Image (cartoon, helix red, strand yellow):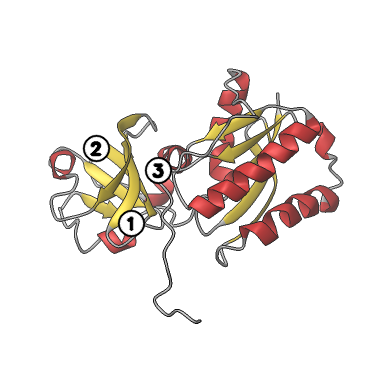
Amino acid sequence: MAIILNIETSTEVCSVSLAKDGQTLFQKESSDGMNHSRLLTVFIEELSQENNFDLKQLDAVAVSKGPGSYTGLRIGVSVTKGLCYGLNIPLIGVGSLDSMADHVALEMAQYFQPQESGNVLVCPMIDARRMEVYTALYNAEGETILPVSAEIIDEQSFDNYLDEAKILFFGNGAEKCRSKITHANAVFAGPEQTSARFMQRLSEIKYNKRQFENVAYFEPFYLKDFVATIPKNKFF
């Protein structure tokens, strides 16, 4: 039995949830944009104060480790490390795509009810640039079929798998792929946004298996190197 604070900042959503034995106790989140540096610590403090919960009761902190937004991941991991250091508790890393896939696999009927029995795969997508997404492919039990990668989506993407099974595409990168992935077995259904709530079952499993990260050396899974852009308009 564990009380775990889950932190999700890999996309435009800033989300925190407190879970006991994988079940939600309290949750706070915002999808108003990349305001994580301002909102994250405020959400954690409010969650504690409004529910009369002492953070010293935590058994661990879990953070979405990526892939996703470079800045969002960096903020989430920095706050998580600070909490784990200060409270002397374990740090748990949960893949951003893994938690999304796990949620949809568990709640399949909420998003998709096939007319006939058959193989269904789930494909979370996190928006990258242009027609690129961070993605992976999972079976209906949430087990990995294709590992996490950065993919530029075109008309042939996932065709080999779509010929054999229906695939649910979802996440904040899915909608822009709808015009490219037009196979009859492609289904665009599922949550558009990430959430700390989706992490809870996996973080509980990792806690029970003692699959902890090294707090000092843990880094987000950026997948791609950060590239800084130079503004076109320069002022001297």
Image quadrant for the N terminus?
A: top right
Q: Is residue 57 left or right of residue 135?
A: right
Q: Residue at x 68, y 37 (%)?
A: 81
Q: CA distance from mark 2 to mark 1?
A: 24 Å
Using the image as rendered, state which of residue 44 and residue 76 is in the foreground.
76
Q: Residue at x 72, y 33 (%)?
A: 84
Q: Is residue 196 left or right of residue 157?
A: right
Q: Is residue 140 left or right of residue 35?
A: left
Residue 43 locus on image (x, y percent): 72, 55
Q: Residue at x 57, y 67 (%)?
A: 32
The label nearer to you, 1 versus 3, is 1
Of helix, strand and loop, which one carries label 2?
A: loop
Residue 115 locus on image (x, y percent): 24, 47
Q: Residues within 10 Å of mark 1 (few under 14, many from 20)?
A: many
Of helix, strand and loop, which one carries label 3?
A: helix
| 3 or 2: tag closer to the N-terminus | 3
Using the image as rendered, state which of residue 58 and residue 90 is in the foreground.
90
Q: Is residue 225 above or below residue 37?
A: above
**Visible residue check, residue 99:** yes
Q: CA distance from mark 3 to mark 2?
A: 13 Å
Residue type (three-letter) at the residue carrying disc 1? Ala
Q: Are marks 2 and 1 in contact (CB under 8 Å)?
A: no
Q: Which residue is mark 2?
A: 117
Residue 174 tag number = 1
Q: Which residue is mark 3?
A: 108
| 1 or 3: tag closer to the N-terminus | 3
View extreme (top): residue: 209
Residue 206 position by quadrant: top right
